Amino acid sequence: MLPLTSRFSSLPAAQGLYRPDSEVDSCGVAMIATLRGTPQHRIVQHALEALRNLDHRGAVGAEENTGDGTGIMVQLPDAFLREVSGLDLPPLGQYAAGIAFVPREADGRAAVLETLERVAAEEGLRLLGTREVPVTDGLVGPSAEAVRPDFVQVFLADARAERTGLELERAVFATRRRVEHATEGYFPSLSTRVMVYKGMLTPVQLDEFYPDLRDPRFASALAIVHSRFSTNTFPAWPLAHPFRTLAHNGEINTVIGNRNRVRAAEGSMATDAFGEDFSRLLPITTPGGSDSAGLDEVAELLHLSGRSLPHALMMLVPEPWENDESMDPDLRAFYEFHAALQEPWDGPAAVVFSDGTQVGARLDRNGLRPLRYWVMEDDLVILGSETGLVDVPRSEVVRTGRIAPGEIFLLDLEAGEIVPSDELKHEIATARPYATWVKEQKVALGDLPRREHITHSRSSVLRRQQTFGYTEEELRVLLAPMAAKGAEPLGAMGTDTPIAVLSDRPRLLFDYFTQMFAQVTNPPLDSLREEIVTSLGVSIGRSRNLLDATPQHARQLSLDAPVLDSDQLAQLLAVDAHPATADFHTVRLRGLYPVAGGTAALRARLEEICEEAVAAIDDGATFLVLSDRDTNQVLAPIPSLLMTSAVQHHLVRTGRRTSAALVVEAGDVREVHHAALLIGYGASAVTPYLAMESVEELVERGVVSDLSPEQAVANLAKSLSKGVLKIMSKMGISTVASYRGAQIFEAVGLSQELVDTWFPGTISRIGGIDLEVIAEEIAARHA
């Protein structure tokens, strides 16, 4: 499948320090609609005016006539299309239309249109005809012109004239997905309900480039417009907004993990909505797409599978329910239930959406991308990123307001009303007995029977400290303060330690990674003062079919924090011994290898562990514990980060990642950075058992005083969890569920081959060591 950034784009390949997969953007968005629901050309005119007034929120490069991207979504302009297409179109709702971006070369163009006709027939549709979309030549700059497609309007209908509405929309969706998978073509929209015009244009160019938009016959009852600012990136024709269901102002910080999660969930996806062969629609998220494109693709799939768009966006961009005790219990249960299906697409987000009959907006849990609205006497509604977008008489404004964090603003054009947010959310939250399902199915780890605590001898702890490279400084300067105070130690001296790749001493694999942080238009969070919007809690277990909702979807284990002590891990290991959780099953995988075998043995054992993980899941495992316990003179520990990432990505590739949770039992973890890395590469929970045993030993030696060993361990777990929250917050991420698998790190000093094999999707700009050097450093510590 051709990556989206390879279609009609000047996006360069990765080179030097540049990585195309780091593309982000920030933008301006607006919506204009009439509650009367009558298509009008003035709605389009108002929308274009608002777009021009958002010009400063977009961007241009050195060429002032090449924009980062702009576009408009409208209802299908039925009367206009009937007049200009020259086709005998069926009634509205019984045909679909859209614009295809096709290659300008004859062969590429023919391949898209021929494939469209063939695939449409296979989906039970017929191609009614095509129309060349008129555009103004010479308007865009050289960069946009060099990658400009041709624009062909296409019209489809059911071959038997039986399917209409949503049923027809699903067949059209399947057709569009299959054609885009097989060709270089791209469809900004192909729908029975809406149409999108967009491109690498500036806001003032849009209606000049597409004369259709200036035609008085071109009418709609709603319009969504968007002006794109590609932050330090390269624009592309397909990456302009709006997409098929939404336009987005903001940045999805967790997009790597979200995409991986969707990819992993594809193996369990099933629905009758698209017929028997769901696999023809895969992959759901298009390679090379932007964060907004991925959000749109998942929202569209959820919608066409049976959920409303507001429901889908409540799943994808939930409000901060975890710490809000005043929230309606039914709404809280809704969010808790859906947390087992879908982690938040986290980050600043103002999302404006429409299915053609409803149009609305959703704000992220922090409200970091504001939206304001105005309601006029004549039922005109204006919503946008700022005030003053449309020049209307102030005396005719009857209502104004702003969208609150986590709120939904919805216009139902068929009913002619603005649906109150609380009423809408209550209706969605009570559509099914989510509260009952959560109460009956979900289990808290703390409710399981406690296990007998095991204490290790000082000699045993010392031997393993040597194996994992502990230093006296780490014990006294890092672990002791965390055990004593329950918080990370403070310091302000910086570091004069060389980066790991330049060090002549064996270094932990963790040291080759650096944390990314929020920058440019993406604000970080304050984990202390904004605690209400953050959450360390996480549900773990098997995630079932994303496109369905049953009581079993809530059958998971809840954790209060991602760092577990050894006693809590013991509870998890014996989970199937408890009658209430007999259907859960935990398998421990040994992360050890014969150190004398060097690189070959390390690689072979990693591959074996990956296959053992697959076999365990196929045998019904709900939790996989990746453990490096029981090292000896022959067997050395595999770096927990290497093992975790290897298993994570192997399970994603094999479509099993959502079938079980990964829990890491690691002797090499003793810093917040270490725990954050493991969670960032897929672990749901971490047990730093040797750090905890070391803390117990520090209490016995009197280095940590006035505390019991149990309290010292609890303080260590608390400080590590709080530290993870701080790191998440620096990147503007609110929940552990979103941070899990998000890979918000760069590798500094790892070879590209190593990264591509074991840490795919990670940025590594300078190259560095390979698996052989890692094996040598393990052996040096093990000696």
Image (cartoon, rainbow, N blue to C red):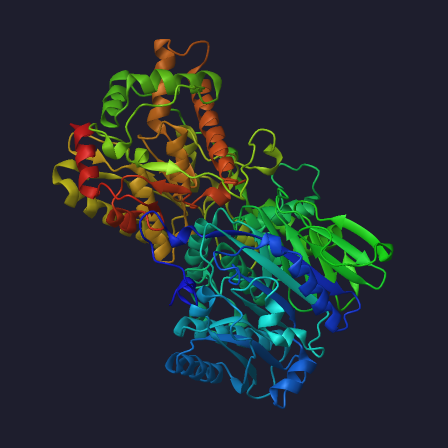
What residue appears at the point 31 percent right and 30 percent down from the top-left corner? 667
Does residue 512 sit above or below 11 in this rendering? Answer: above
Is 513 positioned to the left or the right of 96 in the image? left
Does residue 262 sit above or below 722 in this rendering? Answer: below
Is 281 positioned to the left or the right of 650 in the image? right
> Is residue 619 among the parts visible in the rendering?
no
What residue appears at the point 39 percent right and 65 percent down from the top-left corner? 6
Residue 783 sits in quarter: top left
Residue 482 sits in quarter: top left
| Count of picture labels | 0
Task: Give the x, y percent position of residue 766.
Answer: 28, 43
Is 182 positioned to the left or the right of 444 in the image? left
Task: Give the x, y percent position of residue 559.
Answer: 50, 37
User: Quarter holding the N terminus?
Assistant: bottom left
Task: Give the x, y percent position of residue 421.
Answer: 73, 52
What residue appears at the point 38 percent right and 67 percent down from the top-left corner? 2
> Is residue 322 among the parts visible in the rendering?
yes
Decide which of 454, 33 is in the foreground and name it: 33
User: Which residue occupies the extreme left position in the image?
Assistant: 596
What residue appears at the point 17 percent right and 41 percent down from the top-left corner? 772
Decide which of 261, 527 is in the foreground and name it: 527
Task: Give the x, y percent position of residue 72.
Answer: 62, 66
